[in-house]
Amino acid sequence: MKVLLTILTACGLMLGAKNQQAEAVKRLTASKEVLTDALNAGDKSIPRDLIEKAHCIAIIPSMKQGGFIVGAKYGKGVMFCRKESGGWRGPATVRIEGGSFGLQIGAGEADVIMLVMNKTGAEKILKNEFKLGANAGVMAGPLGRTAQAETDVFMRAEILGYSRSRGVFAGISLDGSTLREDLDDNAKLYGKKLSNEQILLEARPTPAVARPLRNMLNQISTWEKK
């Protein structure tokens, strides 16, 4: 009986680990779909020229939230940052919690995208934990053609925030939200617990499951090496 229980426990742990790894892979696929939709939403799309200027991008698909505008919120996602050559490196994984997102009443979940627009913001977002708004300047990002008329205003922000709930993208400030690295999810993708700084600042190969999203970012925007 004891041997049987040991075997069953081991099988349960293996199954749980596989399910968790599958969830991490699933988030990568969902993140690619969110970014695709964000770029093809017409007048409500995220401007490509802002992605071309961004130092990092974080995508949190299906962030859970309470039934009212302000309430408990929690989500997991992925982040990519630029290499010196201009291409994208990653993914690192992140968790975002709390804050006021100003989303529609009754919306059960939302997709969130953050564009980190300068080097200072990129350095901050790589820390193991920081609070948006308090530790980094965050603004609701512009949509469609509005970016061209307001580039100077928005380029002063370290981070631009966007969300989609009920099928519609909108800019969000994200103030009060806490962003943390997720060492466990990093381990599921890389085979060991790496920090986000290790992944995004060192020459870590992109896992095969993340290459479609990384390649998409490279197609959208790759800086030329100076």
Image (cartoon, rainbow, N blue to C red):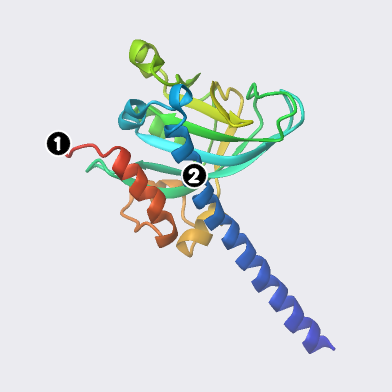
Structural crowding at the residue carrying mark 2, measured as other residues with C-alpha within 10 Å and reported as few (<14), some (14–19) or many (≥20): few
Residue corresponding to mark 2? 33
Q: Is residue 82 visible?
A: no
Q: In the rendering, which numbered label is found on residue 67? A: none
> SS for tag 1?
loop
Question: Given the current orientation, which residue lies at the most extreme front position?
Answer: 42
Image check: 42 left or right of 54? Answer: right
Image coordinates for residue 144, horizontal then vertical, percent: 42, 21
Q: Is residue 139 visible?
A: yes
> SS for tag 2?
helix
Image coordinates for residue 75, horizontal then vertical, percent: 62, 41
* Amino acid on which disc 1 is placed: Lys
Residue 86, picture quadrant? top left
Image coordinates for residue 123, horizontal then vertical, percent: 39, 34
Q: Give the residue displayed 46% in from the left and 24% down from the top.
A: 160
* Amino acid on which disc 2 is placed: Glu
Q: Give the residue displayed 76% in from the left and 80% down from the top.
A: 8
Nearer-N-terminus badge (1/2) = 2
**Residue 172 vertical position relative to residue 190 in the rendered view, above or below:** above
Q: Give the residue displayed 37% in from the left and 56% down from the top.
A: 206
Image coordinates for residue 193, horizontal then vertical, percent: 50, 58
Q: In the rendering, which numbered label is found on residue 226? A: 1
Image check: 212 left or right of 11? Answer: left
Q: Give the residue displayed 42% in from the left and 55% down from the top.
A: 210
Circles 1 and 2, Cβ within 8 Å, touching? The answer is no
**Residue 2 vertical position relative to residue 144 in the rendered view, above or below:** below
